[in-house]
Image: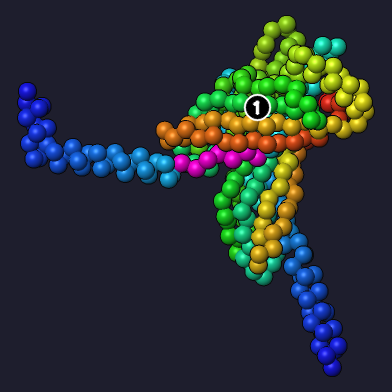
Amino acid sequence: MRINIFLLTLVLMLGSCRSNSSKSLEIQQFSEIKVSEFKKKNVGINTTLRFYNAEEKTLTISYIECDIVVNGKDVGTFIKKKNHDVPAKSIFELPIQVDFKPENAFLNLDYGMVKIKSDVVSDVSIEGYLLSSQNGNEEKVLISARQAVLFSNNKDLYIDEAGKIQEK
Amino acid sequence: MRREKFKKSKVGKRLLFILSLFFLLFAVGNIQAAESPEFIKTKDWKLQKIGTTKMVLSCKAVFYNPNKAKAKLLGINFNVLLGDTKAGKINQIDQKVKIKKRQAFEIPLRIVIDPESNVWASIKGILSAVSMQDFVIHIRGSIQVRVLGIRLKIPVNESEELNLKELLIS
């Protein structure tokens, strides 16, 4: 009898562990990376991280850390240290904004002089992780995005599916 | 003359007392409100130069300012150790660093492995032995920032495993 109770307890414990270790954040995606500012002294990009809490309970996101790379050059780090409660079966959106100096990513040395490139399509990648917790169990979730982004002040320009600059 | 009379009068004394109290409360409030920025990591390690006399590495030290106010970087003071050997010092920054409220900030570091005394000879030995393997570089020291008028010291004790071959490729 005692052995049976012990085995039952063990099975229940293992079962509860299994349910806790399941992935609670089902969908993660970044919206289109937009250029908020493109000036000689400062470049600003922003996007929104969107994910879905597939669990039946509220989970808490306590920390987000992302490295932003433009044209293969590291331009900055985004860190958010704040508790965000995500209700069960709901979508959570977190805006991400990073400012950097244009010379860190857009230097053109073709003419033997330093010149900041304008109207350029660049490869922007965002790599990092977030920490989410539920019932005291912390989970590290990797986040990643890579997009071709048009850096320009001309609002009539856009990039086509092939990644080339086109005029409206 | 009038100022002296005002200071000696009862109203003047009370006013001075209240003003001092306000100043004291403001100062104490600032001390409690100012949180120390936090060291997060080092990243973007690059080998800038390598020769027979010296080696120059660069990286970025990432910190997070949790305060609702901007901060000012006052100085940095790091010792660089290659394995167990003291290899150099960093106490100057190449660029102006802006520390915005509640945001991460990066300090670019230029690490010159000193060719002084016998250190370079021992480092050359280490390098020839580890050129194809990983080696550990330690950055120990602190940065000083001013937040809400309060001077704060943030300790850094970071070890990074690097591979010379990978650094040369990147």
Residue A49, x across and y down, in percent: 65, 48
Residues B19 and A109: in front is: B19
Q: Residue at x 71, y 47 (%)?
A: A129
Which stretch appears magenta? B34-40
Chain ID at mark 1: B
Q: Which residue position is annotated with label 1? A: B78
Residues A16 and A127: in front is: A16
Q: Residue at x 70, y 31 (%)?
A: B139
Q: Residue at x 77, y 65 (%)?
A: A21
User: Vertically, is A113 above or below B68?
Assistant: above
Q: Residue at x 10, y 27 (%)?
A: B3
The answer to which quarter of the image holds residue B13 is top left
Magenta segment includes B38: yes
- State the SS at label 1: strand
Residue A27 visible, this angle: yes
Magenta segment includes A49: no
User: Vertically, is A53 above or below B72?
Assistant: below
Residues A35 and B133: in front is: B133
**The residue positioned farthest toward the front in the image shown:** B118
User: With B87 as the anchor, is B3 left or right in this view?
Assistant: left
Q: Amino acid at mark 1?
A: Phe
